[in-house]
Image (spheres, rainbow, N blue to C red):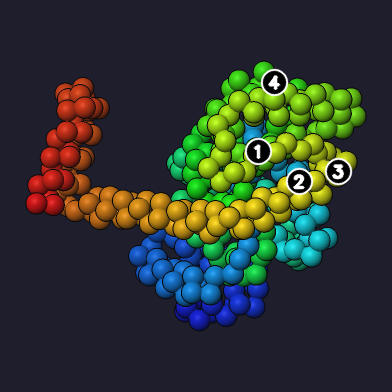
Amino acid sequence: MKRFKLDYYLDGLKAHDHVILARAITLVESKRKEDQKVADQLLDKIVENQRRSIRIGITGTPGVGKSSFIEGFGSYLIDQGKKVAVLAVDPSSQKTGGSILGDKTRMEFLSRNPKAYIRPSASGNALGGVNNRTREAVMLCEAAGFDVIIVETVGVGQSETLVNNMVDFFLLMIQPGSGDDLQGIKKGIMEMAHGIVINKADGDQAKLAKQSKKDLLSALHLFAASETGWSTQVELCSALEKIGFDAVWQMIQAFELEMTSNGSFDQNRSNQNMSWFEERVQLGILLELSEKAGLKTIQNELKLKIQQNKVSVSKATAQMLDAIKQQLA
């Protein structure tokens, strides 16, 4: 990867240059120490003049039509005068580490729009299907002038708390007649969702979708009230027929207005930054320890003993932690 100076990235983001935005995201995703130094400087500069956007996390079971919805919804928002960035996190290939699905292919129409930016990236081993540099990518997209940042996740079933902890509005997508499927969706995800969209509410499924909406609203009444005072809303949509996008956007705008007026919007952003700080510190400590030659030797020896069934995982873990404590003493 070609190296550029800090001003190159700052000027490019200020000019809303998509090519330089892509290079900036690649920079923050890099594991090279020299790249991380420039990336930290870049993030420190843009946070001083951070602009306001609405960050939307979208999740749902595979096949629910997330990508089709995002393409249609993104196009609708652009027609409303917005600039839209999509950070679409694909499942990773276990062999190559690269993304498998390729969202630029799945969102072909939106990807050609000059007011849209789509960044597919491999989720790697990160929980919740979220790349561990997604937060930084969100900040860079905001610095590049995007009004709406959409984070699409791999799907329901992993730790979606990570997604909720980096967006303002968390959207769960389901299909008509998903009563049985809802049993497999964790209650916590339902409680986290600020809005639920029933996609594919068209044709023969239109009537079923309306019934599903009634069932969902009844079920949501059983959940404890949110601390912010917001009640989860349910909307119908058809990405195929491009209907319902206006209702979804009105729901998100109503949420932003209510959360801003009662102070919850900024408080949520602040809480997210605190969690982000703690995560980065913990990760940094682990990386620093892993580079200590003595600890690495002990770790490799314990791995070999585990493979040879000469020690239990629990005992090996205790021995490794003892070695770390001695290193820190």
Q: Secondary structure at mark 3?
A: loop
Is there CB contact under 8 Å for labels 4 and 1? no
Residue at 59% over, 74% down: 13
Which quadrant would residue 80 be assigned to in this image?
A: bottom right
Q: CA distance from mark 1 to mark 2?
A: 12 Å
- Taking the image as shown, residue 7 lies to the left or right of residue 74, namely left
Q: Which residue is mark 2?
A: 248
- Taking the image as shown, residue 154 lies to the left or right of residue 125, namely right
> Which label's residue is closer to the chain start, 2 or 4?
4
- From the top left corner, tell me how far across and down residue 89 is, in percent: 58, 47
Is there CB contact under 8 Å for labels 1 and 2? no
Specify the amino acid type for callout 4: Gly
Residue nearest the observer in this picture, 40 or 302: 40
Q: Which residue is mark 3?
A: 243
Is there CB contact under 8 Å for labels 3 and 2? no
> Which label's residue is closer to the chain start, 1 or 2?
1
Q: Which residue is mark 1?
A: 232
Q: Which residue is mark 4?
A: 179
Res 276 visible: no
> Which label's residue is closer to the chain start, 3 or 2?
3
Q: Secondary structure at mark 4?
A: helix
Which residue, as the protein is rendered here, is positioned at the far right? 203
Query: Quick check: 149 above or below 49?
Result: above
Q: CA distance from mark 4 to mark 3?
A: 23 Å
> Which label's residue is closer to the chain start, 3 or 1?
1
Specify the amino acid type for callout 3: Ile
- Nearer mark to the viewer, of 3 and 1: 1
- From the top left corner, tell me how far across and down residue 254 is, in percent: 71, 51
Q: CA distance from mark 2 to mark 4?
A: 21 Å
Specify the amino acid type for callout 1: Thr
Sort mark 4 into few (<14), some (14-19) or many (20+) by Cα contacts within 10 Å.
few
Query: Quick check: 36 above or below 66?
Result: below
